[in-house]
Image (tube, rainbow, N blue to C red):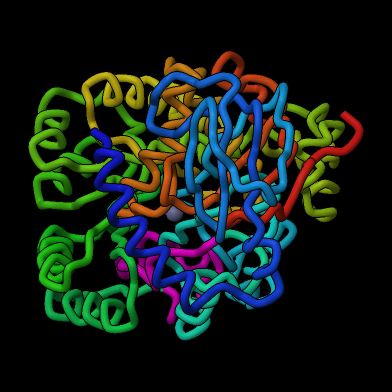
């Protein structure tokens, strides 16, 4: 499933050499230049391999130089004792959004440079250092920010993604409910228009193409279906994307749409199947085509969990990422009662249970599974907090903590074809999450964030003080 470390090393060395030559910002050049030796750490390398106790990591110029029980570090290296701590690769989200939400609001008015950079800072504080914004982005701001984050020009997570994406006319993503501007998503009505939309995004350097194929009933009994994208449109978009060397990620909810899209050549299912158990037909088709799967378990849970858990407002780990307006909403008894009574809440519970079951089935079948939450698309999908919740839910679904961590690190990077991160191995970026305890024994320890290192420089931590 994972590529070999050797291949990683060659690619990573080539990549990071060119980055180091041109893009390292001046303010931390000095911090990067002095080697750092992290000593006596428990290391989880992100490949799925067992944790290695009492291991050292040597970092220089933003990169991991070596990893092992005994390292000959240069004499001038700064030594940092990591006894009692676990070092793992920083987390990577394969499915998030930026610039959609602020406080309790959704909408195009939130698509600003300042709001997006604030969210990317928050991801970083929670140890998520690579974020994929899977559509609903505006040109040219998104393209500028992607370039700046790649170059490390602003604090916060690195940014990849889909420019606008392709939805259905009068359908998903719903323009009114999400308060979207017309230029945030293409809604082609003919195969020609679908190809033109793909070309426009590819010309602007989009990393992937996104499709929304769903009637948005979300499992709510009696809900009115929205018009769904027709197969001739998505087939044209997929073919054109592949011609332009772009892979295609699809929003889905139901098994029938997942199957039709995989058979049509879609590369990534960007949500879990939530209406019924996955079947052998889907599994065999995904296996044969090497299709990736992102469950986004947090998505449905976030629809109700804050209404159910008033006491979470006292949790400093949530408080660290909770906007004051959102906090006031979660504390409002009327809001909580309304959410608990909503038909969507019952449907979301059912959808989450099915999503968890299907994740375990597909994982055990050896399907490529990445990592994402759809954080940032709605106010309750809180950047950073959502990713930690996803890890917890992945373990609740039946994965071991080590397997869940490898989804969010090595696998998440492999989904993005990023060979310079996601693992702790020589040549890779020193993007690291340092936590107290042993998250391979208890996934709850992944919330005990002590330090975050981005490209070899300590940027954050601890997330919660005085623990
Ligand atoms: Zn999404």
Q: Is residue 280 rendered to the left or right of residue 420?
A: left
Q: x, y percentage for residue 401? A: 50, 20
Nearest to the observer: residue 371 or residue 18? 18
The number of discs equals 0
Compared to 256, does 49 lie above or below? above
Q: Position of residue 236 (x, y in %)?
A: 11, 68
Image quarter (top left, top right, bottom left or bottom right) of the N terminus:
top left
The vertical placement of 252 against 280, above or below, is below
User: Can the viewer see residue 202?
Assistant: yes
Residue name at image x 45 percent, y 70 percent: 19
* Residue located at (31% from left, 48% from top): 8
User: Is residue 380 visible in this depiction of the protein?
Assistant: no
* Residue for point 22% across, 25% down: 366
Q: In the displayed orientation, state which residue is furthest to the front.
A: 75
Specify start and end residues of the magenta stretch as a single range: 158-184
Residue 399 percent across, percent down from the top left: 42, 19
Q: Is residue 425 left or right of residue 5?
A: right
Ligand 1 is located in which of the four quadrants?
bottom left
> Is residue 163 magenta-colored?
yes
Q: Residue at position x 52%, y 82% from top?
A: 141
Location of the C terminus (image quadrant): top right
Quadrant in the rendering for residue 363: top left
């Amino acid at each position: 499933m994972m590529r070999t470390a050797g291949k990683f090393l060659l690619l990573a060395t080539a990549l990071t050499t060119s980055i180091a030559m041109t893009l390292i910002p001046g303010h931390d050049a000095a911090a990067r230049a002095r080697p750092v030796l992290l000593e006596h750490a428990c290391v989880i390398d992100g490949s799925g391999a067992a944790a290695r106790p009492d291991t050292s990591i040597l970092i220089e110029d933003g990169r991991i130089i070596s990893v092992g029980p005994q390292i000959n570090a240069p004499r001038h290296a700064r030594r940092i004792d990591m006894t009692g701590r676990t070092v793992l690769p920083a987390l990577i989200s394969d499915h998030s959004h930026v610039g959609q939400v602020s406080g309790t609001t959704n909408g195009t008015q939130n698509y600003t440079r300042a709001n997006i950079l604030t969210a990317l800072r928050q991801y970083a504080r929670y140890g998520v250092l690579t974020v994929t914004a899977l559509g609903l982005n505006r040109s040219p701001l998104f393209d500028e920010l992607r370039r700046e984050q790649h170059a490390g020009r602003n604090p916060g997570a690195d940014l990849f993604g889909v420019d606008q994406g392709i939805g259905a006319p009068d359908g998903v993503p719903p323009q009114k409910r999400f308060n979207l501007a017309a230029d945030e998503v293409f809604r082609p009505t003919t195969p020609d228009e679908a190809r033109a939309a793909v070309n426009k995004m590819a010309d602007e350097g989009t990393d992937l193409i996104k499709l929304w194929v769903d009637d948005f009933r979300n499992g709510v009994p009696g809900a009115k279906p929205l018009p769904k994208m027709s197969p001739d449109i998505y087939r044209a978009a997929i073919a054109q994307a592949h011609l332009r060397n772009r892979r295609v990620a699809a929003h889905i909810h139901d098994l029938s749409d997942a199957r039709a899209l995989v058979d049509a050549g879609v590369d990534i299912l960007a949500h879990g199947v939530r209406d019924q158990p996955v079947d052998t037909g889907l599994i065999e088709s995904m296996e044969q085509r090497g299709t990736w799967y992102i469950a986004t378990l947090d998505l449905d849970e976030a629809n109700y969990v804050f209404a159910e858990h008033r006491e979470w407002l006292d949790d400093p780990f949530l408080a660290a990422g909770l906007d004051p307006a959102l906090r006031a909403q979660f504390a409002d008894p009327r809001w909580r009662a309304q959410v608990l009574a909503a038909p969507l809440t019952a449907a979301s519970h059912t959808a989450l249970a099915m999503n968890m079951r299907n994740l375990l089935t597909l994982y055990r079948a050896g399907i490529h599974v990445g990592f994402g939450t759809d954080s940032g698309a709605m106010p309750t999908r809180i950047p950073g907090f959502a990713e930690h919740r996803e890890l917890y839910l992945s373990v609740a679904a039946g994965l071991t903590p080590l397997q869940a961590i490898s989804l969010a690190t090595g696998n998440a990077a492999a989904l993005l074809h990023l060979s310079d991160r996601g693992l702790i191995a020589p040549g890779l970026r020193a993007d690291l999450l340092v936590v107290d305890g042993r998250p391979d024994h208890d996934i709850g320890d992944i919330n005990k964030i002590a330090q975050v290192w981005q490209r070899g420089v300590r940027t954050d931590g601890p997330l919660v003080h005085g623990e």
